[in-house]
Amino acid sequence: MSDISLSRKHNAAHITLNRPQALNAMTIEMVTTMAKALREWADDDTIHHVLITSSAERAFCAGGDVREAVSVIDANPDIGAEPYFAAEYGFDMCLATFPKPVTSLVNGVVMGGGLGVARLSDRMVISSDIKLAMPETAIGLFPDVGASYFLRRAPLGAALMMGMTGQMIGAGDTMAWQIADAHVPQAEFDALFEALSQCKTQSDIDATITQFETNPPAPHFANHNDEITDIFCQETLTVIIEAARTLPDNHILAPCRDALLHKCPTSIAAIWYMMTKCDVPETSYQAILRDFFLARKMTARPDFREGVRAVLIDKDNAPLWQPASLDDITMPMMQDLFDFESMSPLPERGFIPKS
């Protein structure tokens, strides 16, 4: 059976992520298949909107298949991971600019590129059991797929906490921070899908979702927004680290403190710099264009391969980062990392960008 199932029901086209053994981690073949389908459906007047779901009970999508990214690098070191990211971001651009409504019904694990798929959709509906994160700083990458745009739906402190530490959150915080649009019990997903498939317009879709919507669970981290802001909304990385180091072990944000001290320093600094020092993207489309530059630079660094080894291959969780500490990160290093002047841009693969 294919890792992507494409079908139609009533007025909707349907994409089913169907690689449950890998939590629907997306391969080049999968994103290429979905991008091709979107291009065909854009010109099909019988299709009024698109629904994206998962066949896996445990996950919507755990992100891109980073093992495949490493394989792409090994196959042609001269061009690195460019073909991998050109394919993934090409699909993301198609999704972000698709001229018809797209709705994702999200259950279980939704991380990295999977959150990109969900949030680049026009509507993201979540179940109570979601486990949401942007965990890229653990593997020497950075929160990409337009995260520097869609994480801003949350308060800046929360966005920085999620991006810098990879902290996982549940449905309560996801709704409190407005990262998702609606909460519907997973037991109602089939009925919601059936009802949505009969819709034709965005207003019909929104009204249908409202009929099924229920209150989410209580938030966990959002009740501590002021403390999160006090730690993460600081002028320099040094002050952020100093503030985090004062947290006691029993504090709700202690895992974030530990992440800042142990995950990839360059990755942590990169998302901080992107979110606080770079121009704010006006659209997810603009954010993805910038991600394509940075992704190639980050995956060319030794930290990416080392992070994948430590977390996904050997699973010793003992990466040797270069540099080893956030204390060793300087502003000139970040300015050089974000110098894209001599780099080729992502080929135009989307539709006319949505306003």
Image (spheres, rainbow, N blue to C red):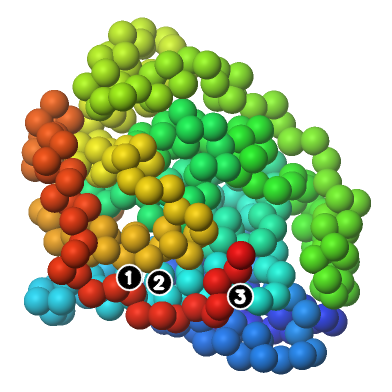
Callout 1–callout 2 Cβ contact below 8 Å:
yes
Pick whichever, 147 or 216, lies toward us: 147
Q: What amino acid type is highlighted by mark number 1? A: Phe
Residue positioned 50% across, 55% down in the render: 282
Q: Position of residue 126 (x, y in %)?
A: 68, 49
Above or below residue 180? Residue 71 is: below
Closest to the camera, between mark 1 and mark 3, is 3
Q: Is the residue marked by circle 2 packed among few (<14), some (14-19), or many (20+) residues within 10 Å?
A: many
Callout 2–callout 3 Cβ contact below 8 Å:
no
Q: What amino acid type is highlighted by mark number 2? A: Glu
Residue on which disc 1 sits: 85
Q: CA distance from mark 2 to mark 3?
A: 15 Å
Pick whichever, 333 or 221, lies toward us: 333
Q: Is residue 247 visible?
A: yes
Above or below residue 158? Residue 18 is: below
- For marks 1 and 3, the one nearer the N-term is 1
